[in-house]
Image: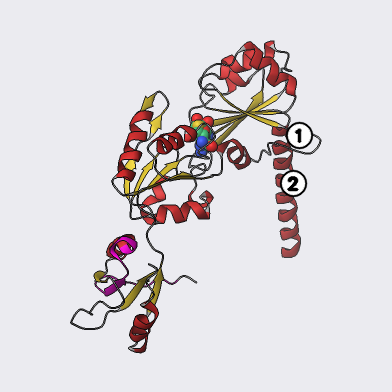
């Protein structure tokens, strides 16, 4: 159960060692509370009136239950608080396609426990201030323009963890799908730092879904290939992709769309193969442009990053379902008018 209480100006006693309580202290201060500290179950109580609330951080010291019971007996509520994340660790977190609600439970916990978060442009960073008290560092990249170089990001992460911080590296989508997650793990391993990876919801699957497109569909497509359009594909790659006969999902593909469409046509893909371009999935201004392979370059001329391209018959499934949606809405309208009659 979650309970919201107004804490502005209230005295909260945060119980737990400095290391374990460091983020709870920041959280309560951010909520406006006047924080007092109790670092161990045998530490003397500060003089003065009883606190409004005791925030008991789970730091593993055995004497806490008896001490906390004394507060309860005096009528002070005791709230359990998680201990801060481990110091000197790095966690690569997949943030999903940009919607706060597509963060995983593990991602939310890692953010809550972080001392510093290095985040990317496509990660759901607008929500960060409500999810963590960590220092927030924007290392975001826009196509062709890196705010901080990849080596610079790795150095920042490693330095912060070596200085004792619990570091979260928040990335868009999944860290291992065109996210350079592998390189960042290697940088941590080289620096002998503990590192873990929390998978995220990749845009390769979720952004098509936001437009109603399933990347596989029974009897339509039983495979999907995710490919980077960062650089033009080779003729071999065009041929292989065409030969597979499944769904093709392209990330970072806006800049090379015309080369891809022409290459797939040269490799023998039908000109009437449907193509969808989904821009800004889960963001305000999400937009889907659908055309056939022969006409997509013209149809998508005004499309921009970030966008996911989907090439394949599955695009028609979305169109058919939209037709069903419209039919269902029409039936609802009819039913409502009958009830009203
Ligand atoms: N690791 C990420 C992909 C990083 S590459 C993941 O798993 O999703 C960046 C590309 O992802 C963008 O150029 C775009 O093609 C795609 N992308 C990520 N988020 C997107 C969104 N919200 N809408 C559309 N495309 C998105």
The residue shown at (68%, 10%) is: 266
Q: Quadrant of residue 299?
A: top right
Q: Position of residue 323 (x, y in %)?
A: 73, 41
Q: From what the image shows, is residue 14 above or below residue 119?
A: below
Q: Secondary structure at mark 1?
A: loop
Q: What residue range appears in magenta?
A: 3-21
The residue shown at (35%, 34%) is: 153
Q: Give the residue number, with chain letter if any, for mark 1.
A: 222
Q: Position of residue 310 (x, y in %)?
A: 63, 29
Q: Position of residue 279 (x, y in %)?
A: 53, 33
Q: Name the residue furthest right.
A: 219
Which residue occupies the foreground of this view, 166 or 60?
Answer: 60
Here the colouring is: secondary structure
Q: Is residue 35 visible?
A: yes
Left or right of 232, for residue 333: right
Q: Residue 15: say if magenta.
A: yes
The residue shown at (70%, 12%) is: 267
Which residue occupies the foreground of this view, 36 or 203?
Answer: 36
Q: Give the residue number, with chain letter if any, for mark 2.
A: 327
Q: Quadrant of the C terminus?
A: bottom right
Q: Is residue 280 visible?
A: no
Q: Position of residue 194 (x, y in %)?
A: 42, 45
Q: Residue 302: say if magenta.
A: no
Q: Which mark is residue 306?
A: none
Give the class, few, some or many, for how many residues have Cα within 10 Å of label 2's Cα (few <14, many ≥20). Answer: few
The residue shown at (29%, 61%) is: 26
Distance CA(mark 2)–CA(mark 1)? 28 Å
């Amino acid at each position: 159960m979650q309970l919201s209480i107004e804490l502005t100006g209230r005295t909260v006693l945060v119980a737990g060692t400095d290391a374990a309580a460091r983020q709870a202290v920041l959280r309560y201060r951010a909520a406006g509370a006047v924080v007092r500290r109790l670092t161990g179950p045998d530490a003397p109580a500060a003089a003065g009136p009883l606190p409004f609330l005791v925030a008991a951080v789970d730091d593993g010291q055995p004497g806490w239950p008896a001490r906390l019971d004394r507060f309860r007996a005096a009528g002070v509520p005791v709230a359990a608080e998680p201990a801060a994340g481990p110091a000197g660790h790095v966690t690569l977190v997949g943030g999903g396609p940009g919607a706060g609600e597509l963060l995983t439970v593990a991602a939310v916990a890692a953010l809550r426990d972080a001392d510093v978060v290095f985040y990317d442009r496509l990660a759901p960073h607008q929500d960060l201030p409500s999810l963590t008290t960590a220092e927030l560092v924007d290392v975001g990249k826009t196509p062709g323009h890196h705010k901080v170089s990849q080596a610079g990001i790795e150095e920042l992460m490693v330095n912060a963890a070596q200085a004792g911080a619990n570091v979260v590296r928040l990335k868009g989508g999944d860290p291992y799908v065109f996210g350079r997650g592998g390189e960042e793990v290697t940088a941590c391993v080289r620096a002998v730092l503990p590192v873990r990876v929390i998978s995220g919801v990749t845009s390769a699957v979720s952004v098509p879904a936001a437009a109603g497109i399933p990347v596989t569909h029974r009897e339509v497509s039983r495979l999907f290939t995710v490919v980077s359009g960062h650089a033009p594909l080779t003729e071999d790659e065009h041929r292989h992709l065409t030969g597979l006969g499944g769904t093709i999902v392209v990330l970072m593909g806006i800049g090379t769309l015309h080369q891809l469409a022409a290459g797939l046509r040269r490799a023998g893909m039908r000109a009437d193969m449907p193509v969808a371009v989904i821009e800004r999935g889960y963001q305000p201004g999400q937009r889907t442009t659908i055309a056939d392979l022969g006409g997509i370059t013209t149809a998508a001329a005004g499309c921009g990053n970030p966008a996911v391209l989907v090439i394949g018959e599955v695009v028609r499934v979305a169109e058919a379902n939209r037709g069903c949606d419209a039919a269902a809405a029409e039936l609802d309208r009819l039913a409502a008018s009958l009830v009203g009659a």
